[in-house]
Image: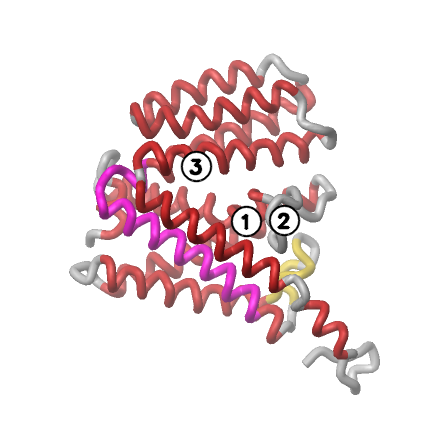
Amino acid sequence: MNKNSQGDEPAPKHNASRSWADMGPRLSSAFVLLAITIFMVWLGGIWFALLVAGVFAGIYREWEVMICASPMQPLGYVLAGLLALVAIGTSLGGVMVGGAVFGVAILVAATGKRTALAWRVFALAFISLVIMALIEIRGTQLVGFYASFFLGATVWMTDTGALFAGRHFGGAKLNPEISPAKTWSGALGGLAVGTLSGLLVWIVAVPMSSWWVGALLAATLSLTGQLGDLSESAMKRHFRIKDSSDLIPGHGGLMDRLDSLTFGALLVFGIGLWHQGLGQIAQGILLW
């Protein structure tokens, strides 16, 4: 229980109520987004690519506004559009086509102001890698849906577990200089819930694969997602903003909602690539 500054009386009830005040819009937004995402991932193909294209073009818009501290400029819209084409190109023609579009985006970015060039190139490279990773993980087979679901369930249930555990238990701060709201109890709660959720998906989706591999991969994915969350918090702290935008009620912006997923996608893509090779990413993630 939280204490006041004297350490001997409970904090006023309205403080506790206020800490949960955003849960209504937060949960409503989450359910809507979850339903849309699962449906589009299930469809796969160009439909999933269009979802990825729209989402990551939106993320780049938030990034552009953040690094420039000004409204979106025409160059930013062009670069966001090119990132959308990275998703569509990867879906239709593979990573070589997606990589070629990324190369064009870098050339276009070089025409802008030099003061923002490094941040733009970093974002274009990182987002393009995440886009190609997500498209390749989903692939065209049913196993790609299971691999994508494993990724999403582990990462987002980590976020959920961290939120509820942190708000319920409180306690020592994880890194107050980067993110004052994050606690060790939240991090451990997120790790537990995320690992168990990922393991459950693993057992149902691929019962022939060793359960301990699923548990180890889910735990590593959960920790990686939390690292992504902290990294995005550090980036926002650097640019002195609280949320990347107010697009999603109760969550902030797209970058706020998907920071964990970006790091997690790169992790499992790398594992799948190492285990089975390009073209068999989902199999490389799930089949052991």
Characterize the local packing of mark 1: few (<14), some (14-19) or many (20 or more) Cα atoms within 10 angstroms: some
How many angstroms separate mark 3 from mark 1 (CA)? 14 Å
Q: Nearer the viewer, residue 21 or 135?
A: 21
To which residue does mark 2 refer? Answer: 252
Element marked by disc 1: helix
Residue visible at 19% across and 62% down? 207
Is 144 part of what is drawn in magenta?
Answer: yes
Residue 194 location in percent, x, y?
A: 42, 63
Q: Is residue 197 magenta?
A: no
Name the residue located 24 percent from the left edge and 38 percent from the top edge: 140
| Residue furthest right in the image | 6
Please report the residue visible at 37 percent of the width from the left and 43 percent of the height from the top: 40
Q: Earlier in the sequence, mark 3 or mark 2?
A: 3
Image x and y of residue 74, in percent: 64, 19
Secondary structure at numbered mark 2: loop
Furthest toward the left, the residue is 208
Query: Magenta region, mostly helix, strand or loop?
Result: helix
Residue type at numbered disc 1 = Arg
Q: Is residue 273 above or below residue 93?
A: below
Q: Residue at x 76, y 83 (%)?
A: 10
| Picture disc at residue 52 | 3
User: Residue reaching furthest bottom?
Assistant: 8
- Could you tell me how far apart the alpha carbons at marks 3 and 2 are, in whole angstroms? 18 Å
Sequence-wise, the earlier of marks 1 and 2 is: 2
